[in-house]
Image (cartoon, rainbow, N blue to C red):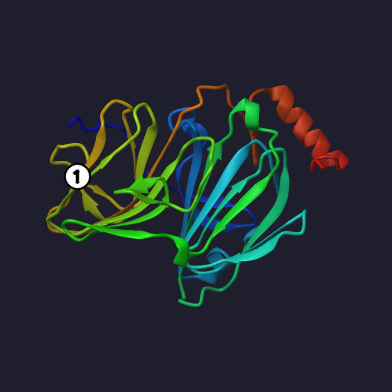
Amino acid sequence: MSYRAIKESLQSVPTIEGAGVRLVRAFGHGQVPLFDPFLMLDDFHSSDPADYLAGFPWHPHRGIETITYLLEGEVEHSDSMGNRGIIGAGDIQWMTAGSGVIHQEMPHVSPTGTMWGFQFWSNLPAAHKMMAPRYQDIKAADIPEVTLPGAVTVKVMAGAVYGVVGPVQDIISEPEMLDITVPAGTQFEHPLPAGHTAFAYILTGEACFDGSAKAYHRETVLLFEREGAAVKVVTRGEAIRFLLVSGKPLGEPVAWGGPIVMNSREELQLAFKEYEQGTFIKP
């Protein structure tokens, strides 16, 4: 079997977002279009409520999908259409903003003392940027976990592992999103769809990912080449936990203005004009 080489490795960079949330950014605007169809990955991880309680007050999205995955803590979300709920530990929310959503995401003080979660942005193709908005809110109890040889564990949010299919369904980019733990002294392999963009984001521990002796550590994102049938992970004296995400690239122009991503500057200008005029939300 051919294995995917590492095309790029990036260390997360401290960033302040929202109303003052301290987080680290694995990749974002400066890396477009390397991670196509993915636009951004933020990691917010703190035991100090002052780092996250300011949250992300009311703001618009159009043309993208936002994916929130929480390991610890609670985040309350609400939107201009009257939707409201709590994302808790182990939950995932896959929001397709489509033609437009105005929403807010406001963390609570974490019951465990630590807030830890991630938000991805995934682009929508031009033909679907103005689709009707929708949510897929998945509770932790509904996310299957697969145990593989070597005591490797995989939580399957989207995609499939050994015939176990994740609960996030009917996404245009055909994504796979896995939370993987590989014990020390173990080898793990996972096949990937041909031509799909794939990256790993390391949460804890270290491992080798490309057949070399180089070990990669926490808060590092690894972008794989699109050639190769599978990703191979080898651990030594330490276990590793990482997110593995893949999706079908779009190959389209990206016009990015804050929380709105379209295909042209004209489309961006129209979106912000509609937001100012109160016509952003479509019936």
Residue 179 visible at all: yes
Q: Quadrant of residue 184?
A: bottom left
Q: Position of residue 164 (x, y in %)?
A: 35, 52
Q: Quadrant of the C terminus?
A: top right
Q: Nearer the viewer, residue 181 or 105?
A: 181
Indicate the amino acid at tag 1. Cys
Residue depicted at 66% across the width and 32% down the height: 129
Q: Position of residue 132 (x, y in %)?
A: 70, 41
Q: Nearer the viewer, residue 55 or 211?
A: 211
Q: Nearer the viewer, residue 252 or 173?
A: 173
39 shown above or below 50 = above
Q: Position of residue 182 (x, y in %)?
A: 23, 56
For this view, does 40 lie left or right of residue 10? right
Q: Report how many numbered discs are placed on residues in the image.
A: 1
37 shown above or below 239 = above
Crowding around mark 1 (Cα neighbors within 10 Å: few <14, some 14 to 19, many 20+) is some
Residue depicted at 46% across the width and 28% down the height: 249
Q: Quadrant of residue 27?
A: top left
For this view, does 157 lie left or right of residue 17? left
Q: Position of residue 208 (x, y in %)?
A: 19, 44
For this view, does 248 lie left or right of residue 264? left
Find numbered disc 1 in the image and state the secondary structure of the residue it sits on. loop
Disc 1 target residue: 208
